[in-house]
Image: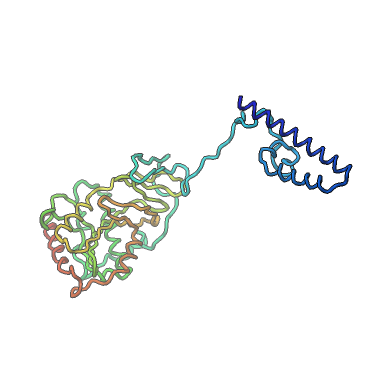
Amino acid sequence: MFTKLIHFLKMSWMLTWRLLVIGTILFAGRHNDILPWFAIGASAVLVFGFNKTLRTWPLIRLIAGGKALMAANTWGEPSSKPVRHTPTRTPNRGPGRPNLGTPGGVQRPSFIGHVGSATNNGRITGFEPKALESVAVPNSVSMTGAPGAGLHGAKGMSQTNINLGVKGEENFAKALSLTGQIDRFKTVWSVPVPAQNSFVPGPYGTDIDCVLFTDSAIFLVDLKNYKSGDVRYFSHGNELFCEDGVTHKQVGEVKEMTRNMEMATNAVRNYFPHYNIVPVVVFMPTDKGEGVIDNVTWPGGITAMNLTEFLSVLANQRDFNWNATPHAGAVGQFGQLLRMGASKV
């Protein structure tokens, strides 16, 4: 009923204003008066201002570049022709990119397909494994222990993963050396995670890859030798995902972000409650360069970053100073912890 009423009013309006315009033109032609011409102009402006009226006047629609007259029986009703809707794309999302939803959401991301490695290289840093092959592992008086020593003979790890882990720690030491930072700070390598109630090796079978002492902080560094290149790492819950920058497919397998570093940080803070303990997870570049780490946080609120980012952090740290650094005494205790761990092997 309402549609018929609208249709009747529309048709009446179409007929009425046309008759008025035609009558005004005839009247103005006979009497040569300016007022009717003014009325015609005002009527034209009024008609042009109503969008619905424009739909019913083919001449104005064609001049304006619009479509032809809409069928009168469809005015105010949905068209029977199918309408093609272009799906809205989220900024920076490519085909197959998972929708993370709201932070802390329950929906687990999924990809459309997998690839074994990144399609393209990422940012080349100069610290790629091939670039560091000819660089010797530093042997500085500022170093206690050897990079990767704790991984040799590690239980529960394949030889491939052991080799990758050792190479990652060695390349981290090489990067510190090449940037002139290995002698600026004190480092202790492959330190066993201490027990929660005393500063002795705990029963966990895990270690801290590098404990790095600056003037104002003790960095607990966990090194990751994961796939890289033109990829983006992001997390959901305690799972770590890697997305190819070209295909937006998943690179490799989903990784679990363990609580090992959280446990190690809590143990160290229990023993050194007044020291500035800063845990960090550092992604080492592969020969495909480094990717993007998209706000990845390890369990316990531990920040993850690329090697180049961490080197920039260290560049802004003051040098370790035995006489001025407030936590200089902790260096010897970490060294003792390392030796106790080595004696158990």
Residue 229, x across and y down, in percent: 40, 53
> In this view of the protein, which residue sits in the foreground, 295 or 103?
103
Quadrant (top left/top right/bottom left/bottom right) for the C terminus:
bottom left
Q: What residue is shown at x 35% (from left), y 51% (from top)?
A: 227
Q: Residue 226: x and y, percent?
A: 33, 51
Dividing the picture into quarters, in which one does residue 319 lie? bottom left
Residue 149 is situated, as x and y percent measured from the top left of the image, at 20, 58
Rendered view: 102 above or below 175: above
Q: Which quarter of the rendering shows the N terminus?
A: top right
Give whichever of 258, 303 is nearer the camera. 303
Residue shown at 33% from the left, 47% from the top: 240
Q: In the picture shown, does residue 312 fall above or below 245?
A: below
Q: Is residue 67 above or below residue 327?
A: above
Left or right placement of residue 110 versus residue 335 in this view: right
Q: Is residue 193 left or right of residue 77?
A: left
**Is residue 46 toward the left or the right of residue 218 in the image?**
right
